[in-house]
Amino acid sequence: MKLNRFDTSRIKVGQGGGGGGLPGGGGTIGCGGLVIVIIAALVFGVDPGEMLGQMGAGDTTSTSTQQQQGQMTEEQLCTMNPYATEACNTLTSLNDTWEPLFKKANIPFEQPTLWFYQGGTRSGCGNASASMGPFYCPADMGIYIDTSFYDVMARQLGAKGDFARYYVVAHEYGHHVQKMTGMADQVRSAQQQNPRMANQLQVRMELQADCYAGVWAGKNRNLIEPGDMEEGLNAASAIGDDTLQRNSGQSVNPESFTHGSSAERVRWLRIGMETADEDKCDTFADLRS
């Protein structure tokens, strides 16, 4: 995918705190990251109970992520390695694609901030480690990435190629779209009212974020290169819950799914790509019937 070079006057990029491991205390990771804990357990052998216990449930506004920003300029952050440059280019394209749609619909929109970190960081949603993978924090509207995850994604998950990496950022941006439309708050409220549906609702959130990632690609079809679509669909398949469980030697347990099966993730990413229509991303439709 031939993306235009990032424009630091139109994107927000920050540097999160570094450090290894996951310190105790601090807030809870929001919709884009809490479920990543389970993936971390499957892929990296991390104990999810231990991770969740360490994260705690404190005040999500107690520490501002702005205080973590280093001395590097946005230009320096976006050029510190090729993956960072890719992520900044992707963020520019995502902003250029989604912001006009919100303006047309007369829905207030604020761009998310892309945060780069190494090892561990503290977001507005609490503490996080690189083993969790990229995540979106609705409390501070930040997309958090340790770019070393891309190498792990390629080696351990078989999700290779630049478009697979674009898809990661676009999926997290999809959670930002949900935050801006109010869908994230509606789902969180529904989960609290009906805890038995919590997992199923979370899966629908993730599948919708996949679809929104596909919509971004579909609306920029002129930039797509041969093989891009296949890379994205392969990445979606590689991180399906059933595939992760099977590859970790576990029995496939649909009731424990947090992101959806490989087939579901591929289906919704494809719907977004082929229709380029965000209105087609209603992954909750069958729950209303």
Image (cartoon, grey):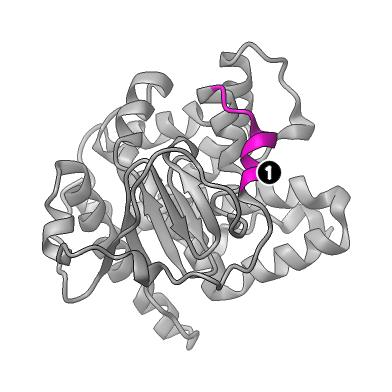
- Main secondary-structure element of the magenta-colored stretch: helix
Q: Is residue 268 left or right of residue 215?
A: right
Q: Looking at the rendering, which quadrant does residue 149 occupy?
A: top left
Q: Looking at the rendering, which quadrant does residue 245 occupy?
A: top right
At x 15%, y 68%, the residue is 7
- Please name whichever residue, 162 or 101, is drawn nearer the observer in this view of the structure: 162
Which quadrant of the rendered structure holds the C terminus? bottom right
Residue 63, magenta (yes or no):
no
Residue that lies at the very extreme toward the top in this rendered image: 249
Give percent across and percent down for residue 87: 26, 51
Give percent across and percent down for residue 153: 38, 29
At x 33%, y 61%, the residue is 114
At x 80%, y 55%, the residue is 287
Q: Is residue 144 left or right of residue 37?
A: left
Residue that lies at the very extreme toward the bottom in this rendered image: 106
Label 1 sits on a secondary structure element that is: helix
Which quadrant of the rendered structure holds the N terminus? top left
Residue type at mark 1? Gly
